[in-house]
Amino acid sequence: MIPEAGPKSSPPETPERLVPLDVDVSAARAALADVPWEPGAPKPDPILIADHVVRRFGGLTAVDVDHVEVQRGVITALIGPNGAGKTTLFNLLTNFDTPDEGRRTFNGEVIDKVPAHRIANHGMVRTFQLTKALSKMTVIENMKLGATGQKGEKLWRSLLPFTWSAQEKEIEQRADALLVHFKMDHMRDEFAGTLSGGQRKLLEMARALMVEPEMVMLDEPMAGVNPALTQSLLGHVTGLRDQGMTVLFVEHDMDMVQEISDWVIVMAEGKIIAEGPPASIGQNQAVVDAYLGSSHDSALDLDQEL
């Protein structure tokens, strides 16, 4: 196994044109100041909306979300106790699972019928808690695989390289630029199976950007990552927002939630029970009850390990 690189003294610099988006990030964050701290609160410029989304497994209702909106151009954390339904909701929002009821809208377009493998074409990509790198392909091959709309994927075109070679070169250049940005260019020709857990997280995040998405969904990006790489990953997540992308992530690491999120959505027993800026969540009685039980009346310390 190849050792992970240690943390850098400063966050990674973001290239000027990795994923150029016309989003005023400062204005998007400032607009949250007027959003009420309540479940299902409407946002000034929502990119993703879920209405009356319900998912049942037999007699168990895993998700029962009346309404939730994700603000464009900011980092939103989705948190909650174990079994709250976070991952199930995440899968429903990205069409990796199908709700029994409800509607999901992305960029004003209903995406209920869009297959999971085509969601990326709409500008939404996701990563997984357990990384999905193709271990017997090299790092650069994994990166190139992430690009959409490749002409050479058509059977008849694959026999005519002159019809797709120029595009292939552009894709490889973009992949190399992202590997440099994520400081993985030295791993370019290594098999993905030789990477450590943290390096696979970086590869998956970099590969997601090959789609040039508007929204990135991260499922527990710090899971299985050693502390030496945590700060690097945090810098890359905030870099996504600084490029104008919207980020929604599921996370148990409350230090990370406090450090990088602009808005927090809290789930418990399948429902949205609270929303607000990170500093407000620990004072919310519904959140305290969900994490500690209704017998506790003190504020929740999000700096403690939960």
Image (cartoon, rainbow, N blue to C red):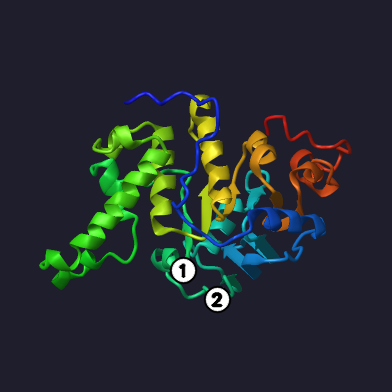
Question: As drawn, which residue projects farthest toward the left?
Answer: 159
Q: Are marks 2 and 1 in contact (CB under 8 Å)?
A: yes
Q: Amino acid at mark 1?
A: His
Q: Secondary structure at mark 1?
A: helix
Q: Position of residue 284 (x, y in %)?
A: 83, 46
Q: Position of residue 304 (x, y in %)?
A: 72, 29
**For the point 75% across and 59% down, which residue is it?**
31
Residue that badge 1 annotates: 122
Q: Position of residue 252 (x, y in %)?
A: 62, 39
Q: Position of residue 62 (x, y in %)?
A: 62, 58
Q: Earlier in the sequence, mark 2 or mark 1?
A: 2
Q: Amino acid at mark 2?
A: Glu
**Within-10-Å neighbours for mark 2: few <14, some 14–19, many 20+:** few
Q: Secondary structure at mark 2?
A: strand
Q: Dividing the image into 4 quarters, which one contains the N terminus?
A: top left
Q: Dividing the image into 4 quarters, which one contains the C terminus?
A: top right
Asked whether residue 221 appears in the rendered view, the answer is no
**For the point 65% across and 51% down, which residue is it?**
76
Residue that badge 2 annotates: 109
